[in-house]
Amino acid sequence: MRKNIWRLSLAFSLFLSILCTGVSQAAFASPGPTPVTSGMSAQSLPRTDGKTVVWNDYRTGDRNNADVYATDLTTGKESAVATGPLDQRMPDVDGNIVVWEQGQPCPQPSINPLYAATTSTWVGCHRDIYAKNLMTGQVFAVANSSSDQSDPAISGSWIVWVASNTPGQYMLQASDINTMGSVITLARLNAPVVTHRVDIDGNRVVWGEESTDTSSVRHWRLLTIQIGESNPTVLDQGTADNDQFSWDLHGDTVVYAFHNTSFILKTINLKYGDRLTPTFPNQQLPANPTTDGRYIFFEDYQALFDSKGATLNLQGYDLLTGSYFGIVVNNGYNAAPFMRGGILVWQSGQPQTSVIYSSAIINVLPSAKQAPVPSTADRYYFPDTQHTLSFGFKYFWDHSGGLPIFGYPLTEEFSETNSDTGKVYTVQYFERERYEYHPEFKGTPYETELGRLGAIDAQQRGLSGTGSFQTVPNSNDPNCTYFSQTGHNACGTFRSYWQSHGLEFGDPSISFRESVALFGYPISEQFVQNGTTVQYFERAVLEYHPEKPQPYTILLRRLGTDLLTQRNW
């Protein structure tokens, strides 16, 4: 007997198809990222406040003599901020003020300018801190003295930088450019800041210190202070086996990365003291992170090591949902990510022909609209939602009821932490469901599963403790089926729909286990919600619409749409 057209099948592996074709989940780049610089030269270390992008520019061809350029993201107009015979570099921007360090050109360390971690502190090279008001064109000295100043950062009216009167002795200094008062010393550094510039947000400053002991062991400390305080706080410390120590600050969130036998990324919430060390999927190696308090973007050194220097990719992580997603894959270096004001900037290309890119954060999320691509036997492109469906998930969608059961895809494939198991799975969201690939069940009907979106929706709505969700005894009502697994009934039209739909496991007709795989067990009795009779199941919410013709009297709620809306995707 032929099974119902709505039924789903679960026998195919997404990753097996992907591995056979060499296509990864990160292969589909969002159309959002766009270049913000003109020409092709060595351009590096971009910074932004969400309105303006500034960067080091070597269009003269002299690596010992950088210039500072800026692009207005509203108009797209590029302008020179600081050029000429002096070496001007390490710019930062907030509001209409750009700050940078400048001095006479001098030999620089032998570093690839596409690696963002290295700062510009060089022994014997005198530097001063300057600023420019982009509205008025006024250029003024922020710190101009006999000491060396480098690596400025700006937030509001406060500028911070590293100063040194004596080689090997460093100070963290600051100045309020609104008052142009005296330079204040925030802290005396026990070791030089050698891997990353100081970060400031509001009046909170975060920096790192490194030193090497007599046994050549590298030690690092991450510290913070608020302007006006007298003593810094050590946030974390440890040892590392190379100079991959970097950090970023936004609001109460500090993110930092270091290498100690492996690449490690951590976050600290300064307000609540919460600490998190994400476990990244697919052997990602995080370095040089940036954050806006919710999202973290970082360089992923895995591709660099796998390809022996051919590529360097960017990855993203959502602190709120535990989601991981690739951003840029273009067979080149994608490095130095920096994020402010809802905008992500980075440098992309090869050492001599790098370009600065920018994108709104929303345009690099898995939900970002995708540029049209030709549909093939292995891939569909849906103009309705501007997303693709590929390989194993495409086969599953095709043979499992398609649009009426699942709706259109609302994301690309990405990795996400399952709140029930704590494990990371490859997922894709649709209007009514979430696909999850479970490699631990490879070769079984449960290799791909549907997310428990009904349970998630009930929890988020605060329904789990309400009357309809309380367990009930078995009444032996012939119009109902009682599920002892959850202590709830499915009755009448809801029971009929549950029993007549299911995943395709190859069982005769539609079996109990196939219906469970599609809907899960009931977690509530039926009740009226917003004028509609509904019943919650683990993986779905069934709605009864008697005003509609068959077979549409029972509809599946668009739980995937609701969930993505709640997370602002």
Image: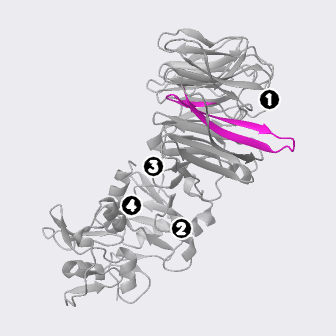
Q: Secondary structure at mark 3?
A: loop
Amino acid type shown at disc 2: Leu
Expressed as whole percent of the image width and height from the top left, the position of residue 297 reads 56, 44
Q: Disc 2 designates what residue?
A: 14
Instruction: Find out whether the residues at labels 4 and 2 contact each other: C-beta distance under 8 Å.
Output: no
Q: Disc 1 designates what residue?
A: 109
Expressed as whole percent of the image width and height from the top left, the position of residue 348 reads 63, 37
Tell me which label, 3 or 2, sits earlier in the chain: 2
Q: Residue furthest front?
A: 230
In the displayed structure, does residue 524 sit left or right of residue 242?
A: left
Q: CA distance from mark 4 to mark 2?
A: 16 Å
112 w.r.t. 517: above or below: above
Chief SS of the magenta region = strand
The magenta stretch spans which residues?
Answer: 198-227
Q: Residue at x 63, y 37 (%)?
A: 223
Q: Secondary structure at mark 2?
A: helix
Instruction: Find out whether the residues at labels 3 and 4 contact each other: C-beta distance under 8 Å.
Output: no
Q: Disc 4 designates what residue?
A: 430
In the displayed structure, does residue 395 sit left or right of residue 563?
A: right
Amino acid type shown at disc 1: Pro
Q: Residue at x 55, y 14 (%)?
A: 132
Q: Secondary structure at mark 1?
A: loop
How packed is label 4: few (under 14 Cα within 10 Å), some, or many (20 or more)? Answer: many
Instruction: Find out whether the residues at labels 1 and 2 contact each other: C-beta distance under 8 Å.
Output: no
The answer to whether any part of residue 347 appears in the image is no
Q: Disc 3 designates what residue?
A: 372
